[in-house]
Amino acid sequence: MVKRTRKQKSVEAKMVESVIRDWWEKSLKNAQIKAGEILRSFEIYVFPKIGNLPHDETHLYVWLSLIEEVVKVKPTIGARSYVMPKPPIDGEYVGGLFL
């Protein structure tokens, strides 16, 4: 029964990419000057690595290690990740709302 419940939850789970795209659409698209560049950074550096993971199971340490990798390769992109408005990480996306 537990296995079945877990399987059902993973089928219904929102993936990191879809949550970030929703967040971008609702929070940044019309409010941020470089919103397109921010989304493009996610498309290049985040979505290929963790975009298909369930959002609720992607913990903060996963995000931090990913940002550290980006900072090593592209310091300006990594710095942008630290100063931009906070994306929905670690349980802040609840029922279609960003908290």
Image (tube, helix red, strand yellow):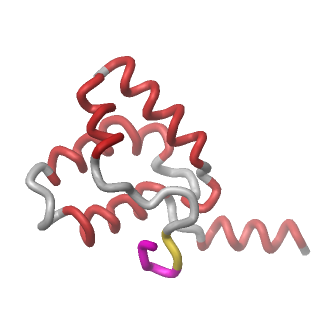
Quadrant of the rendered structure where residue 1 is?
bottom right
Q: Quadrant of the C terminus?
A: bottom left
Residue 16 in the image: x percent, y percent? 47, 56
List the single residue furthest toward the top. Answer: 72
Give the camera-side residue of 15 and 27: 27
Quadrant of the rendered structure where residue 57 is?
bottom right
Using the image, determine if residue 33 lies above or below residue 27.
Answer: above
Give the camera-side residue of 32 and 4: 32
Using the image, determine if residue 15 lies above or below residue 97.
Answer: above
List the single residue furthest toward the left. Answer: 33
Task: Report how many numbered discs are placed on residues in the image.
Answer: 0
Q: Is residue 80 magenta?
A: no
List the single residue furthest toward the right. Answer: 1
Horizontally, residue 35 falls left or right of residue 7, namely: left
Horizontally, residue 7 falls left or right of residue 34, namely: right
Using the image, determine if residue 97 lies above or below residue 63.
Answer: below
Residue 77 in the image: x percent, y percent? 26, 32
Residue at 42% x, 73% y is 98
Magenta residues: mostly which secondary structure?
Answer: loop
Using the image, determine if residue 47 lies above or below residue 75.
Answer: below
Residue at 14% x, 65% y is 31
List the single residue furthest toward the front. Answer: 83
Residue 97 in the image: x percent, y percent? 43, 78
Horizontally, residue 72 falls left or right of residue 91, namely: left
Residue at 39% x, 56% y is 87
Residue 50 in the image: x percent, y percent? 50, 44
Give the magenta range. Answer: 95-99
Residue at 82% x, 71% y is 4
